[in-house]
Image: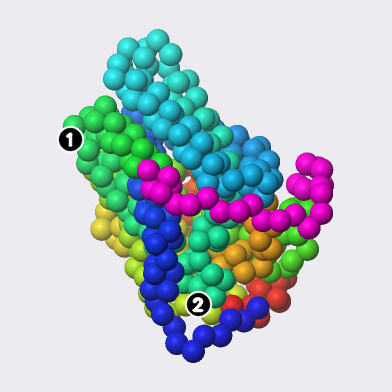
């Protein structure tokens, strides 16, 4: 699984027009959804003052996403991926409109309905994500030739992280200055722009099936393919538990409001910091792809991420906390690029939707389930001890994985 090229071109993937539209759509949608996450997190915490309620945000989005992802992957290998993307991005637009209506009369709606409508919106977003994640991943792989997958993964991660940098900052500032209505209206505009970008990309042929399969066989074959590969399983498991235990993003409103003493603007900057670090790393990896000793680099990156979380938890200085979050984002992005490249290179074209769905279940939704774990642990242990525990567990799991997965240690891309 080693690709050779005479001369590395850091802009190889961006030379394809449709891939540029694809990455633009990814950037805009990420920015909009990250803005929405900041808005929802601040609204929920302002109303409840309960860290567990922040964890429930993640669980409410993850459960429907996990439940539907395998079927979403099955559809992505059977029908037009572009059509799926347009349909469920439109569903996200509808969810943002409902949130706008709720915020327009926020005080009255909270008194009458509590937080239920907000969680319902999050639930709808989770359903849409369950279909979108495998379709977007599989569709993106059809837009560039195989020899530039590593480069495409780096730029894909870069634009995603750039959206993650911009979204929380813009969301926090707009919400703090102009209020929730304006901020949520801007989210809807971004989602509409995403739909426009995808509309200008030509539909791609659905990969030919090697044989007819029932729905049950199709789902089983996708899962089986992933779990037969030690590299796949170890990379997914490593990232799953690292994010599950090591993430502190769900608790950032608590750190911003009670430990570091900042408002929504400070919360936006805290959420920006990991993505800012990730953007720097992604651009670096576009010029210097992590082909050699990729497995070792993955292990060191995840272990370092856990250490950053421990140090962040005990910091009481806003600027030190920002630096540690930025470092965690830099290390996390090394993992993202290597893992996404593994998936694109190893997954057959006709199974890419299902393989992406399995990856989405174990990785994409681990952020939301990790958010629930963080909220529950904070409720039981306290905010700082829970994050220290999570970072320590991340380092422990990295060590165990390194010992039990020799093929991952030897991985070369």
**Sooner in the amino-acid sequence: mark 1 or mark 2:** 1
Query: At which x and y percent is residue 412?
Result: 61, 80
Q: At 45% across and 87% down in the image, what residue appears?
A: 7
406 magenta-colored: no
Q: Is residue 23 visible?
A: no
Tag 2 residue: 290
Left or right of 378 in this view: 255: left
Q: At 26% across and 27% down in the image, what residue appears?
A: 181
Left or right of 123 in this view: 308: left
Vertical placement of residue 299 versus 227, above or below: below
180, 243: nearer the viewer: 180
The quadrant of the picture occupied by the N terminus is bottom right
Vertical placement of residue 35 versus 223, above or below: above
Crowding around mark 1 (Cα neighbors within 10 Å: few <14, some 14 to 19, many 20+) is few
Query: At which x and y percent is residue 333?
Result: 46, 64
Give the main secondary structure, helix, strand or loop, of the magenta stretch. Answer: loop
Q: Quadrant of residue 112?
A: top left
The numbered dot on residue 177 is: 1
Crowding around mark 2 (Cα neighbors within 10 Å: few <14, some 14 to 19, many 20+) is many
């Amino acid at each position: 699984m080693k690709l050779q090229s005479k001369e590395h071109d850091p802009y190889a993937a961006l030379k394809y027009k449709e891939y540029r539209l694809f990455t633009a759509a990814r950037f805009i949608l990420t920015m909009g959804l990250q803005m929405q996450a900041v808005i929802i997190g601040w609204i929920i915490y302002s109303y409840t003052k309960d860290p567990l309620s922040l964890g429930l945000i993640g669980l409410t989005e993850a459960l429907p996403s996990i439940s539907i992802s395998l079927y979403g992957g099955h559809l992505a290998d059977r029908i037009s991926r572009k059509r799926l993307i347009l349909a469920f991005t439109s569903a996200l637009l509808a969810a943002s409109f409902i949130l706008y209506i709720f915020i327009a009369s926020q005080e009255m709606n909270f008194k009458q309905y509590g937080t239920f409508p907000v969680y319902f919106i999050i639930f709808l977003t989770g359903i849409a994500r369950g279909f979108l994640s495998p379709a977007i991943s599989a569709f993106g792989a059809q837009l560039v030739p195989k020899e530039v997958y590593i480069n495409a993964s780096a730029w894909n991660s870069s634009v995603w992280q750039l959206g993650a940098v911009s979204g929380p900052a813009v969301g926090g500032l707009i919400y703090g200055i102009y209020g929730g209505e304006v901020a949520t209206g801007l989210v809807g505009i971004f989602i509409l722009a995403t739909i426009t970008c995808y509309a200008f990309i030509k539909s791609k042929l659905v990969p030919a099936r090697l044989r007819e399969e029932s729905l049950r066989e199709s789902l089983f074959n996708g899962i089986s393919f992933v779990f037969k590969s030690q590299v796949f399983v170890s990379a997914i498991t490593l990232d799953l538990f690292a994010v599950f235990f090591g993430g502190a993003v769900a608790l950032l409103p608590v750190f911003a409001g009670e430990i570091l003493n900042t408002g929504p603007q400070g919360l936006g900057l805290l959420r920006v910091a990991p993505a800012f670090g990730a953007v720097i790393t992604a651009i670096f990896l576009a010029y210097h792809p992590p082909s050699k000793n990729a497995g070792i680099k993955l292990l060191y990156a995840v272990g370092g991420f856990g250490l950053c979380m421990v140090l962040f938890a005990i910091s009481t200085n806003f600027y030190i906390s920002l630096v540690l979050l930025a470092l965690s984002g830099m290390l996390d992005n090394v993992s993202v690029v290597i893992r996404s490249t593994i998936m694109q290179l190893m997954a057959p074209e006709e199974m890419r939707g299902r393989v992406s769905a399995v990856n989405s279940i174990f990785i994409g939704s681990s952020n939301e389930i990790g958010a629930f774990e963080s909220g529950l642990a904070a409720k039981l242990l306290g905010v700082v001890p829970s994050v220290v525990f999570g970072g320590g567990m991340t380092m422990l799991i990295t060590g165990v994985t390194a010992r039990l997965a020799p093929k991952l240690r030897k991985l070369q891309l």
